[in-house]
Image (cartoon, coloured by chain):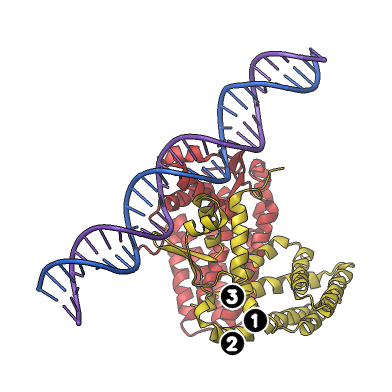
Chain colours: A yellow, B red, C purple, D blue
Amino acid sequence: MGETLEGTIAFRVVGALRDDIVSMVLKPGDVISESDIAARYGVSRQPVREAFIRLAQQGLLLIRPKRATVVKKISPDGVRQSRFIRESIEVEIIRRVATDPKPETGQILDDLIADQEAASSAHDSRRFHKLDELFHRTLARLAGVEYAWQLIDDHKMQLDRVRYLTLGVSSSQRAIAEHKQIAKAVSTGDVVAAEAAMRAHLARAEVLLSQTIEDFPDYFE
Amino acid sequence: MGETLEGTIAFRVVGALRDDIVSMVLKPGDVISESDIAARYGVSRQPVREAFIRLAQQGLLLIRPKRATVVKKISPDGVRQSRFIRESIEVEIIRRVATDPKPETGQILDDLIADQEAASSAHDSRRFHKLDELFHRTLARLAGVEYAWQLIDDHKMQLDRVRYLTLGVSSSQRAIAEHKQIAKAVSTGDVVAAEAAMRAHLARAEVLLSQTIEDFPDYFE
DNA sequence: TTCCGCAATCTTGTATGGTAGATGCTTTTT
DNA sequence: AAAAAGCATCTACCATACAAGATTGCGGAA
């Protein structure tokens, strides 16, 4: 035991702040200070400061020395490049999986899609979102590069803030249909179709950004 | 001014430790402590601790709570996946650049290659390495995703530690020839050839890893 | 009225002391 | 002799105090 630092105060503060930022409880541009957060959580400045450092390195906070710390505004160009990174990696993943599909691949993906349909029918959007994420992470695992997904996950936080602003807009039916396309192309070893399906799937979120910027201009830089 | 934190002690310690780790002055498995480093640099433990946090998040250190902090050993699988990430992104970059090459693209790349040839003739391996890095970063800039290169750069630290163990092995002549291939394919808009040339260029380092593991087994996990 | 300067008061950065957990060696017990 | 208990001594974690840059607003001078 104790091989990780999950039990530390700093770790808890990191999690709490990250959740608040991604879920827009703390809004882009909000000014916070080590003392504020420390008082709010009833701890000293020290672990809060360390949490700030971690979150700043993840691109969620901006520490302005001797001035203040602010919740980083969403950078449209940053979002664009995060998507570029995600698409680059996921396309390469889908290629590798489709090039050499294992026998059990199709069944694994189909099971996940079935779960998603259940969550969609139950209108459990939180579970649906979790399963959507799992679908993509599973593809990474099948390609033997699960660590690469962890990287995407870090950058996805930026995208998730935008997603949170557009809740309810996304059509789960359409996402499921696209997942089915991807799964089918993968299990039949059709690399070209798999890549095209993945690109189309990822491109769908594209249109949302400009509209969101107009709706919430203060949250963007 | 002062919009950054470059002037802080913690920042300097980060840089110094990172250089020591990448250049193998601090070797994988070495045990260090906040007190050690603090005494060595003549500062207090606080900025050292913050430097540890940053470096741990970058994957160079492993903090074992209440036990010690060690220079992280190189993970062969991590190196493999870092290469996967790099190849995914760089291939996508080269596609975009080659798909829509700007008029000045060819000249920019040719100039860089010329500089590299000069550095190679002068046997200035440090400058050669810097220019090699600049070549790739320039491609990212031409694709409009310079931030993506920054991401690669973070992961490249892991690869650089391996590279440092194999100094002198790489042939600069061959690297230059490959850069020329890439530049030519890009400026003529030959997407397929550009992608193939980039993959070949990145794959060349592949063979070195297994040999390096045999030569320095203690540095790997 | 406008502008300049200064001081109160924010902020983050740094130093240091104390706490608790983990390790390893010594001593004690069986 | 072997195993277990105790203790010295590491470590990172946390709390607190102080330092120094940055901001704000007030007051006096032009």
Q: Is residue B125 above or below residue A21?
A: above
Q: In percent of the image, x 62 and y 60: which residue is there?
A: A16
Residue B102, percent across and down? 50, 84
C-alpha span from label 1 to label 2: 9 Å
Residue at the disc numbered 2: A211
How many numbered dots are placed on residues in this image?
A: 3
For residue D21, side relative to residue A137 (left or right): left
Task: Tell me the amino acid under the disc marked 2.
Answer: Gln
Q: Mark number for residue A166?
A: 1
SS under mark 2: helix
Question: Which chain is disc 1 placed on?
Answer: A
Residue A90, percent across and down? 70, 72
Residue B68, percent across and down? 59, 39
Mark 3 residue crowding within 10 angstroms, few (<14) / some (14–19) / many (20+):
many
Question: Which chain is disc 2 placed on?
Answer: A
C-alpha span from label 3 to label 2: 27 Å
Residue at the disc numbered 3: B93
Position of the N terminus of chain A, as image quadrant, is top right
Question: Which chain is disc 3 placed on?
Answer: B
Closer to the camera in the image, C3 or D1: C3
Q: In percent of the image, x 64 and y 49: which residue is there?
A: B74
Task: Tell me the amino acid under the disc marked 1.
Answer: Thr
Mark 2 residue crowding within 10 angstroms, few (<14) / some (14–19) / many (20+):
few
